[in-house]
């Protein structure tokens, strides 16, 4: 029993030492009055690249972890049926153009005949008025002229109908072209492929998700502060972030959001006692230029501490002076 008691005592001492070391490594730095802090983790907006219409995935051009730029093609859907419909619409346009050309030529030809018929009618009408031509001849000229005029109108109507059909076929082709473009899935932001959700050949419904893009240009940390600290904060104020994985570096950021309403702090942020207090959500956003410089190093999910100045007149302490890692790390 005495032997076991010694072992238990050693375990207790080692546990206490480990707890002390952990506290020493993870304790918040001594801060002057007017500096507040809260725990959080780096986050970024997740963008779902999804289909607009049902279809089969033809090819996926990006893998998990790949960096993509805004407008870059991520995947293509099978457009074989649409391509066939586009060919049909183009053929319809050509047919209608031919009919329109023929009808326009008919208008020109009949108009020439109508002009001649009008002259003949005018001549015979004059001769009839002088008593040198029979009325029957004048009536025949009039009938012929009116028939040709009606034929001109028919050809003009044919031209208008063909032009309307051409416009409809072109509109149909424009719609089909838009459908084809919609089946070419592009990234709406520059970022990293977080998840590849389907494989080539799979059939998806409307709104089927293909990949998830992490928009690393909008990386931020959310912390929770009591009213006394959050009440004086302003959008655009300077802030600092220290990550647990990089405790030797201080990352600059800006306050981009302060909740107008108090809420209970989430469980993962503080202790049960702290969760009973109403807190204000504060969002610290990293500068886009900074993220662009460290595009191959930034990662979401890293936990750390965010610092703000509840008193704007207070200078940042030396421990919170901006210090960034080398880009090659």
Image (cartoon, rainbow, N blue to C red):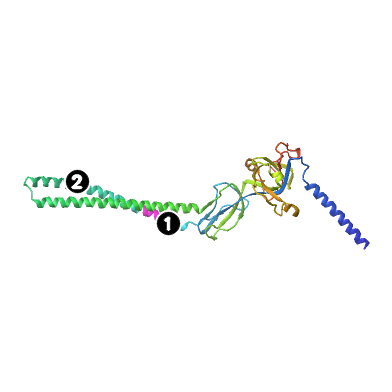
| Residue 301 place in picture, x, y as percent | 68, 51
Mark 1 crowdedness (10 Å alpha carbons): few <14, some 14-19, many ≥20:
some
Give the magenta-colored segment's residue range: 82-94
Residue toward you, 110 or 277? 277
State the separation of the CA atoms marked 2 and 1.
45 Å
Residue toward you, 117 or 251? 251
| Residue 98 place in picture, x, y as percent | 32, 51
> Do tag 2 and tag 1 residues touch (Cβ < 8 Å)?
no
Q: Give the residue drawn at x 84%, y 54%.
A: 15
4 sits to left or right of 222:
right
Quadrant of the image for the N terminus?
Answer: bottom right
Residue 112 appearing in the image: yes
Q: Secondary structure at mark 2?
A: helix
Q: Secondary structure at mark 1?
A: helix
Which is the main secondary structure of the residues drawn in magenta? helix
Residue toward you, 59 or 246? 246
Location of mark 2 (residue): 115
Image label count = 2
Residue 97 badge: none
Location of mark 1 (residue): 85
Quadrant of the image for the C terminus?
Answer: top right
Q: Please check the rendered image and state whether residue 217 is part of the magenta-colored stretch, yes or no.
A: no
| Residue 23 place in picture, x, y as percent | 80, 49
Q: Please check the rendered image and state whether residue 86 is part of the magenta-colored stretch, yes or no.
A: yes
Q: Give the residue drawn at x 29%, y 52%.
A: 158
| Residue 273 place in picture, x, y as percent | 75, 53
Q: Residue furthest bottom?
A: 1
Q: Give the residue drawn at x 23%, y 52%.
A: 151
Disc on the earlier residue, 2 or 1: 1
Q: Give the residue drawn at x 22%, y 47%.
A: 111
Mark 2 crowdedness (10 Å alpha carbons): few <14, some 14-19, many ≥20:
some
Q: Residue furthest right?
A: 2
């Amino acid at each position: 029993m005495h032997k076991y008691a010694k072992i238990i005592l050693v375990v207790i001492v080692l546990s206490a030492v480990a707890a002390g070391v952990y506290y020493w490594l993870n304790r918040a730095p001594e801060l002057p009055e007017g500096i507040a802090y809260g725990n959080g983790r780096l986050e970024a907006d997740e963008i779902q690249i999804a289909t607009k219409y049902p279809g089969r995935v033809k090819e996926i051009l990006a893998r998990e972890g790949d960096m993509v730029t805004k407008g870059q093609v991520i995947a293509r859907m099978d457009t074989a049926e649409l391509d066939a419909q586009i060919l049909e619409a183009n053929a319809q346009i050509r047919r209608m153009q031919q009919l329109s050309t023929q009808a326009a030529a008919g208008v020109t030809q009949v108009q020439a005949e109508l002009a001649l018929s009008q002259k003949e009618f005018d001549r015979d009408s004059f001769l009839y008025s002088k008593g040198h031509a029979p009325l029957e001849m004048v009536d025949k000229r009039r009938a012929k002229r009116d028939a040709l005029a009606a034929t001109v109108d028919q050809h003009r109507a044919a031209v208008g109908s063909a032009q309307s059909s051409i416009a409809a076929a072109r509109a149909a082709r424009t719609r089909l072209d838009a459908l084809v473009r919609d089946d070419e899935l592009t990234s709406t932001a520059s970022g990293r492929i977080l998840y590849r959700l389907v494989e080539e050949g799979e059939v998806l419904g409307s709104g089927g998700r293909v990949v998830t893009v992490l928009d690393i240009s909008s990386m931020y940390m959310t912390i929770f502060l009591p009213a006394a600290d959050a009440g004086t904060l302003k959008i655009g104020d300077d802030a600092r972030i220290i990550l647990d994985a990089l405790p030797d570096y201080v990352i600059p950021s800006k306050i981009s959001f302060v909740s107008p309403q108090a809420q209970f702090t989430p469980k993962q942020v503080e202790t049960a006692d702290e969760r009973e207090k109403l807190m204000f959500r504060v969002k610290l956003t990293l500068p886009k230029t900074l993220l662009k410089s460290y595009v191959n190093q930034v990662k979401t999910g890293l936990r750390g501490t965010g610092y703000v100045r509840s008193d704007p007149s207070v200078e940042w302490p030396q421990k919170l002076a901006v210090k960034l890692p080398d880009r090659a790390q």
